[in-house]
Image (cartoon, helix red, strand yellow):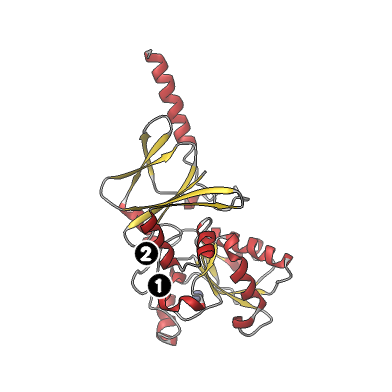
Amino acid sequence: MKKWFFYCFLLLALGFAVYHITPFFEDPRDIKINQGEQKEGELIEGDSENTQKIKITEKQIYKGKLLLVNREYPVRKESVKTDIINLFNHRELTKGYGLLDDTIHLSKVMAQKFSKMVDAAREDGVNNFLISSGFRSFERQNELYEEKGADYALPAGHSEHNLGLAVDVGSTTQMSMYNAPEAEWIDKNAWKYGFILRYPANKVDITGIEYEPWHIRYVGLPHSAIMKEKNFALEEYLDYLKEEKEVSAEVEGEKFTVTYYPFSENMTINIPEDLDYEISGDNIDGVIVTVHE
Ligand SMILES: [Zn+2]
């Protein structure tokens, strides 16, 4: 090959590689992306014409939407979402639902998804949503734990609320979510917006938490769709990915490949160059790479 041709090709390949490190969007109908939340992976070089090689660092085990948080696996300080906002000051994101008070905080990306979900519910005639709790700092969680005890709250660092990706939803017309139409709608439809009911009635033995029809967790698509389809709690879904190594999914005509990798030193993964991808840790010992085909 002529030298100049090789250099031209190299430039072109590099251009493509850089262009394609755009964060992949989890809602097929939403191509808005949040630059602040994008992947940590570092592109090393184009492995060949068709793949990009991404370096995975240990800290990536503890970042992302799929982190498992429970009594066994606490939230690390570095895992807390960096786009936390006070919803009271973002009225554009709280149209069509109420806030219990002016201290409700949430990841901005999650608040955008929540807002979309509420819009869709309204079209189905379910329109009395309320957010009663969102992001809680470790300090706030500790206060709750000390005030209300272990039956009501988890110790600081062991609640998904400390991550910024969990929200407690209420109904403005029903005292209890146990038989509110809002809870029923969420159970049926929340997955379409990337949310899961984190503590379902039939998973108490797996989550270790009693049924909470109000507590939803954001994991993003296609994960929420796969979990709904297979009736998995987050614990089960992560076990399933570890066992299968690679899972394909199609959601509303969009194709995804979800691959689990155990973390190891000097780890790199290859990703097709022209596809969007997203990396999340599991908060245990590995990372999950989701490629949008
Ligand atoms: Zn909750």
Amino acid found under the numbered disc labelled 1: Phe
Q: Nearer the viewer, residue 249 or 185?
A: 249
Mark 1 crowdedness (10 Å alpha carbons): few <14, some 14-19, many ≥20? some
Q: Quadrant of residue 2?
A: top left
Q: Position of residue 78 (x, y in %)?
A: 37, 60
Q: Is residue 52 left or right of residue 256?
A: left
Camera sees residue 164: yes
Camera sees residue 93: no
Label 1 SS: helix
Q: Is residue 10 left or right of residue 180?
A: left
Q: Residue at x 70, y 72 (%)?
A: 126
In the image, residue 241 sits, relative to residue 204, either above or below, namely above
Q: Nearer the viewer, residue 179 or 239?
A: 239
Q: Residue at x 34, y 56 (%)?
A: 286
Q: Quadrant of residue 80?
A: bottom left
Q: Pick out the residue farthest to the top.
A: 2
Q: Which residue is identified by label 2?
A: 77
Circle number at residue 138 = 1
C-alpha span from label 1 to label 2: 9 Å
